[in-house]
Structure formats: C-alpha cells, structure tokens
Amino acid sequence: MKNIEYKVDMHIHTNESDGTWDIDELLKHLIDRNIKVFSITDHDTINNSIRMMDIIPNDIYYTVGVEISTTYKGKEYHITAYDFDYKNFKLNELLEFNQFQRKKYNYKIVQYIKTINKIENIEDYYSYEYDNKRGGWDSLNYLLDKRIIKNLDEYFKLVELSKEKLLFKSPKEVIKTIKNAGGYSFLAHPSAYENGEKLSLKLLEEWRDYGIDGIECFSPYLRNLEDSGSYLDFCRDNNMLVSAGSDCHGEFNNRTLGIPSVNFNEVRLDFITI
C-alpha cells in the first residue's frame, strides 16, 4: 500500500457544533500537523462539513461526515457517518430532529436552574446568542455568562441533578438512514460510554447486528493499547471497517488534533482511495 505514513483523523468538531475552530482554522492546524486524511464530524449538523469540500488542497483526502446521536438502552451513544449523500432528505430530517431535541433539552436545563432559585428570570434566554468560536452550546454558555456556573464540571453537576434526559432515535433507525443515504456508519469512541472501560463483546455484537459498518478503534478515550487491539480483532473477525479520531473540539477541550496518532495503513476506510 502506498502513502502508509499518511496521518488520519476522522473525528473532528468545528464551531458549527461545539468546537472553536472554523474551517479555515481547522485546515491550517491539519496542515501544520501533517494530517492528510480527515473528516469533520460535527454533532447533528453537516454545514461546515459541506463547506470544507470547497477549500481542500489536492494533497489532502477529505470525506464529508457527521456525528449523529442515538439512544441505546437509555444512554446517549454516537454514530459517526461518512461519505453519504448530504442532500438526502431522510438524513437531513434526522439531523433536524436531533437539533430540535437538543434545543428542547437546553431550554429544560435553563428552566431547571430557575426552579432551584439560582436565577430569577430567564426571558432573555429566548433571544440569547453567543460567539460560536467559544465552543460549547446554548445553555452552557448562557449559564457561564450569567455567572451561575464557573466551568463545565459545575454545568454537568447541575445537569445530573436536573435528571433531564436527551432522547434520540434508535441505533437501528439511525444506521438504516445512513445506509439509505449511501453512507457508512461507525460506532464512535466505544470506550467513552463506560468511563474508559472496554465495551463488552455482547454489546459489540449487538451493534454489529444493528448493521454498523465499523468501529472507531482508535480514540483518546482508550485506557490502554490492548483495548484498541480488541476492537481491531472484532472488526477483522466480522469484516468491519476501522476508523481513528481525536474528537478534537479546538480549544474547547483538551483533546489534541491527530491524537492518537494513526496512519492510513492502520485503519480500514474502504470509501477512501489513496
């Protein structure tokens, strides 16, 4: 295989969702880090993923992508999708549904803060806007600006107390929608859902049976390389694709672009030809 030293990062967020970089800034960072194969996977939106297609240099391999939330056994899981028809009606309908669910959830969090008397009036939340290069999302930045919270940890403590839950479509429905749009679906950062612990073989088999095309075997949530090896073995034994991603959000979190460092010959992305 040629060009085996090409670095890969298939899981990146921009300021269109909860990251801090716009597409020009992201491209500069990618070039600086010599990352030659990548995708933008913003949460439930493809706006910047589409815009990036117009500015890619000839020596970089880019694939349109998105990270779609799903509800699995009462928990939020993420599916990264790639190489789909971004004009597909059902796919865009799904993304709009998820965006609406997030909007409702954000409002419920702010409402909860009012009910526990941490803020008197939330009328200005309806018209609240913030610079999206801050990263994050509506309710987080609103509560930061109101000085109700000081940081992300305080936000999540309040969210836990609120007992509010985000509800999305099932994995089976999300995967079917991606396939019907001509795309490929991956279970994103599998170790993230169990606080860094490896997902069980039983759970992986359930995702396989739902029709997932691959697994993000390399991610910053791995506690050790042996776990990535287990995911790789599962993908090989079940003829599934293999991805790698940093889940970088720019300056919003401490996940570094291109880390874990993975080369193209270590993944299996059949929809990318080098």
Image: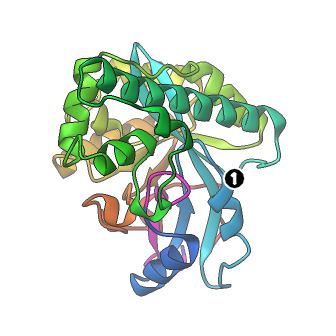
**Residue 40: where, in percent of width, then height?**
55, 59
Of all residues, the one furthest to the front in this rendering is: 120
**Residue 161: where, in percent of width, then height?**
22, 20
Q: Residue at x 57, y 37 (%)?
A: 213
**Which residue is the site of mark 1?**
83
Q: Nearer the viewer, residue 133 or 83?
A: 133
In the image: residue 268, left or right of residue 49: left
192 relative to 14, above or below: above
Magenta part of the protein: which range? Answer: 2-19
- Location of the C terminus by quadrant is bottom right
How many C-alpha atoms fall within 10 Å of the one at disc 1: few (<14), some, or many (≥20)?
Answer: some
Magenta stretch holds residue 3? yes
Q: Residue at x 68, y 79 (%)?
A: 55
Q: Nearer the viewer, residue 234 or 99?
A: 99
22 relative to 29, above or below: above
Q: Mark 1 belongs to which amino acid? A: Asp
Q: Residue at x 62, y 47 (%)?
A: 45
Q: Quadrant of residue 122?
A: top left
Magenta stretch holds residue 111? no
